[in-house]
Image (spheres, rainbow, N blue to C red):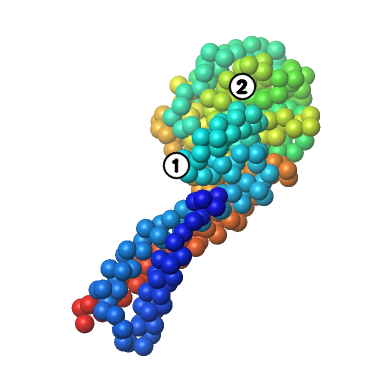
Amino acid sequence: MMRIMTIKLSNLQNYMAIMREYASSICTGGFQTRPCVMFREYCKSLKLLRNAFICLFIMANIGQGAVEGQTPGSEIASLPACCRTATETAKLVSSVNEKAVQPGVDEKLGAILPLDLSFTDETGATKTLRERITKPTIIAFVFYRCPVVCNLVQGSIAEAINKITLKPGQDYNVLSISIDELDDATTAGKKKNEFFNNLVGGKFPDSAWKFLFGSKENIKAVTEAAGFYFTRVDGSIVHPAALIFVSSEGKIVRYLHGTQFLPLNVTLALTEAAENRVGFSIKSVVTFCFSYDSAGKKYVLNIMRISGLAILLLVVTLLFFLFKSGKREEKK
């Protein structure tokens, strides 16, 4: 870290002196140095400023790792490749290989799910995903012993589909797929009775919402294909909350994150699935602003990263102001 933080302090001091002189000249109306000459000197310092930005974001990422309890080696991963020694690179590769899977969603829009995988439903019938995904389909990766998050997700699904005009079984289907290989027809049937019968009632065809379970290998294959990652912690399963919308061809067209889903968003996602059209991804915004806290088992606002972005925007605004002010003075 100290290696990449080494900056020529004399150049930095000169740069700050130029900035102070420029700011002073704006306030007093007079220049000790011609604006064009000062601006050229200012431009020479852009490389130094760029390096400062790189260091700022590296510090933010390293700080994030310390707060979130990342595995050893995460601080090395934050370093640019050119700044790592051979020993550090070897240590990083080793730490990555040993690191447990971090819960989260890696959106794979446009990817095709492995439709030849077989899963069993609450009635004991075993079919492939190809036989079940015959129209736009909402997929919820849950597990039936989940005490909180999965109940919120499936409850929100029931509430949303009660309010949309699309016809279940005709325009779309719903699949709840357990990520716990220990689930069986009993737990799947109990969960279907809880959400399907109590919240959806007779308005929803029985075949339009299936509660599936399967082998560990098939679960891993389908969740990895969808970019849905989870891990076992102290006998429970830590996992993200999201819905995945796929077309009749098994193509992933949209993700909806969280535990609350607006009927409008569900309708739009199903419409995109019917048209086999990949929708907009909000992954970049969500993952930038939030990080998974493995200790607290929840997503938390990434203060350091957002602060770094705010500082960057502030500096860019200042540079733009200085540039425009210099242009006005040259015209005078």
The location of residue 299, given as percent across then percent down, is 65, 46
The reply to whether dot 2 and dot 1 touch (C-beta < 8 Å) is no
Q: Nearer the viewer, residue 318 or 272?
A: 318
Callout 2, which amino acid? Lys
The image shows residue 34 at horizontal and vertical percentages of: 26, 79
For the C terminus, the quadrant is bottom left
Mark identifier at residue 197: none
On screen, residue 249 versus residue 286, left or right, reads: left
Determine the residue positioned at 63% across, 21% down: 219
Q: Quadrant of residue 249?
A: top left
Asked where in the image residue 19 lies, by quadrant, the reply is bottom left
Q: Secondary structure at mark 2?
A: helix
Q: Nearer the viewer, residue 202 or 93?
A: 93
Q: Is residue 38 above or below residue 261?
A: below
Q: Most extreme residue toward the left, as rendered?
A: 331
Question: 247 above or below 158?
Answer: above
Disc 1: which residue: 82
Mark 1 is on which residue type?
A: Cys
Residue at 57% in and 22% down: 222
Q: Nearer the viewer, mark 2 or mark 1?
A: 1
Q: Is residue 173 visible?
A: no
Residue identified by numbered label 2: 220
Q: CA distance from mark 2 to mark 1?
A: 35 Å
Foreground residue among 35 and 240: 35
Residue 275 seen from this side: yes
Could you tell me residue 144's position as x and y percent? Answer: 73, 27
Examine the rendered structure and indicate whether residue 65 appears above or below residue 323.
above
N-term-proximal mark, 2 vs 1: 1
Left-right relation of 257 to 201: left
